[in-house]
């Protein structure tokens, strides 16, 4: 992974809608960055925060979703991204598990909720916020998720296999949970060195 450039820029802040609770006016909530969004890496505390439900879908959310897709596709193996990973504490995820298939259309889900989980499967997972770390993670084999699409319509996504996995992984991000949290015992111990190095790079 290319070395991260730290760039400070002054961006306009759009005031939060008055219908939103005070806490949802968290860092960078309503900022509309001009350039590409930087993917936050392990050690960045925003990855551990719970994201806030989206009350209204405006230009800000549409731009955010677009920027998230750009950031996801820019990463060679990116198949999913959650808004906190680009520094925005909003409940928005994007997923495209078949990104190399030209006919594939990405999912953009607002306020996704897991309706049901079924079965069990173990597969290797990674995360754009935790570069160079992978682990076998046990997840449900099937997941049914309800959400709003970008037009604010209620939708239901039934995922199996890798899509089910991606849905679970990205919704975890909205709750401050990372895939490594599902690793326990010895394997966790083995990851510790790599994680510590990532945190060091952050400070
Ligand atoms: Ni991730």
Image (cartoon, rainbow, N blue to C red):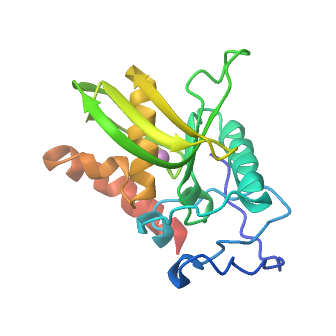
Q: Is residue 133 visible?
A: no
Q: For the point 46% across and 60% down, which residue is it?
A: 42
Q: Is residue 112 visible?
A: yes
Q: For the point 24% across and 27% down, which residue is it?
A: 118
User: Which is more toward the observer, 115 or 186?
Assistant: 115
Left or right of residue 47, residue 172 in this image: left
Q: For the point 22% across and 24% down, which residue is it?
A: 119
Residue 28 screen position, x and y as percent: 66, 74
Q: Looking at the rendering, in which quadrant would you find the N terminus?
A: top right
Q: Is residue 164 above or below residue 102?
A: below
Extreme residue toward the bottom, this view: 22
Q: Is residue 168 above or below residue 50?
A: above
Instruction: Name which quarter of the figure residue 106 lies in.
Output: top right
Q: For the point 70% across and 44% down, which residue is it?
A: 151
Left or right of residue 175, residue 85 in this image: right
Residue 147 screen position, x and y as percent: 51, 43
User: Which is more toward the observer, 98 or 74?
Assistant: 98
Instruction: Name which quarter of the figure residue 94 lies in.
Output: top right
The number of discs equals 0
Residue 149 screen position, x and y as percent: 62, 41
Residue 38 screen position, x and y as percent: 68, 59
């Amino acid at each position: 992974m290319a070395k991260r450039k730290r760039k400070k820029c002054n961006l306009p802040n759009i005031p939060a809608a008055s219908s939103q609770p005070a806490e949802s006016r968290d860092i960078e909530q309503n900022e509309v960055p001009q350039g590409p969004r930087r993917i936050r890496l392990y050690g960045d505390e925003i990855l551990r925060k719970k994201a806030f439900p989206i009350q209204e879908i405006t230009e800000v959310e549409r731009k955010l979703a677009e920027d998230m897709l750009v950031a996801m596709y820019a990463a060679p193996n990116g198949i999913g991204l959650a808004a906190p990973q680009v520094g925005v504490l909003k409940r928005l995820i994007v997923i495209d598990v078949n990104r190399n298939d030209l006919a594939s259309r990405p999912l953009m889900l607002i306020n996704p909720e897991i309706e049901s989980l079924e079965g069990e499967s173990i597969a290797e997972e990674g995360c754009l916020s935790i570069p160079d770390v992978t682990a076998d993670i046990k997840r449900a084999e099937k997941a049914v998720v309800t959400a709003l699409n970008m037009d604010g319509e209620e939708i239901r996504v039934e995922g199996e296999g890798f899509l089910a996995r991606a849905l679970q992984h990205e919704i975890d991000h909205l709750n401050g949970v990372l895939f490594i949290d599902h690793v326990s015992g010895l394997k966790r111990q083995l990851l510790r060195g790599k994680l510590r190095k990532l945190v060091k790079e952050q400070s």
